[in-house]
């Protein structure tokens, strides 16, 4: 089994990792996903925003290739509004990082675009 770096950069001590955004794509759209990832990285380069590596295969509860971003609550509105306009055809799951993965990926989840069926059996309930 391959392992992937969640973040391209190490999170600094005290980084408020309060929200995740998962960007899903079919593998044949990896080029477009990489372009979107680069666009996001550039747009949010001057704020506390970290973006993970492209993960080209299903991992954990995520059934499609994806990449993720981490950001603090204070950026929630800015990030979500930007993604609503700029995400293109990609499905994006935005959720809090409360420490309860099942809650975060179900009741706490917000979808931009079509939802993706996650494998909830991966979470302890």
Image (cartoon, rainbow, N blue to C red):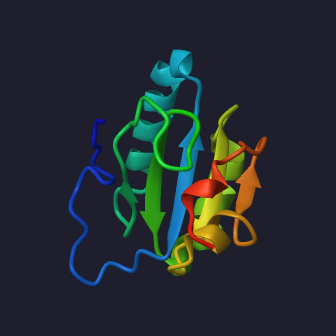
Residue 109 against residue 31 in the figure, above or below: below
Indicate left or right for 21 with 39 as reference.
Answer: right
| Closer to the camera in the image, 13 or 36 | 13
Q: Which residue is drawn at 71% across and 42% down?
A: 116
Q: Residue at x 37, y 70 (%)?
A: 48
Q: Where is residue 17 in the image (x, y as percent from the top left)?
A: 41, 74
| Figure check: 45 above or below 102 | above
Q: Quadrant of residue 82?
A: bottom right
The image position of residue 108, as x and y in percent, is 70, 72
Tally of numbered tags: 0
| Name of the residue lying farthest toward the right | 114
Seen from the viewer's position, the closer of residues 55 and 16 is 55
Instruction: Please state the horizontal and vertical placement of residue 50, each as a whole percent of the image.
Output: 36, 59
Q: In this view, does 77 lie above or below 60?
A: below
* Residue lying at 39% horizontally and 36% vertically, measured from the top left: 54
What residue is drawn where x is 54% and y is 80%? Answer: 98
């Amino acid at each position: 089994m391959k392992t992937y770096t969640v973040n391209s950069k190490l999170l600094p001590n005290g980084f408020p990792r309060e929200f995740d955004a998962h960007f899903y794509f079919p593998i044949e759209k990896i080029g477009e996903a990489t372009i979107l990832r680069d666009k996001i990285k550039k747009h949010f380069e001057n704020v506390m925003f970290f973006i993970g590596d492209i993960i080209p295969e299903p991992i954990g509860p995520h059934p499609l290739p994806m990449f993720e971003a981490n950001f603090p609550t204070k950026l929630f509105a800015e990030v979500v509004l930007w993604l609503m306009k700029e995400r293109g055809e990609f499905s994006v799951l935005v959720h809090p990082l409360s420490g309860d993965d099942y809650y975060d990926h179900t009741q706490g989840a917000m979808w931009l675009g079509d939802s993706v069926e996650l494998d909830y059996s991966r979470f302890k309930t």
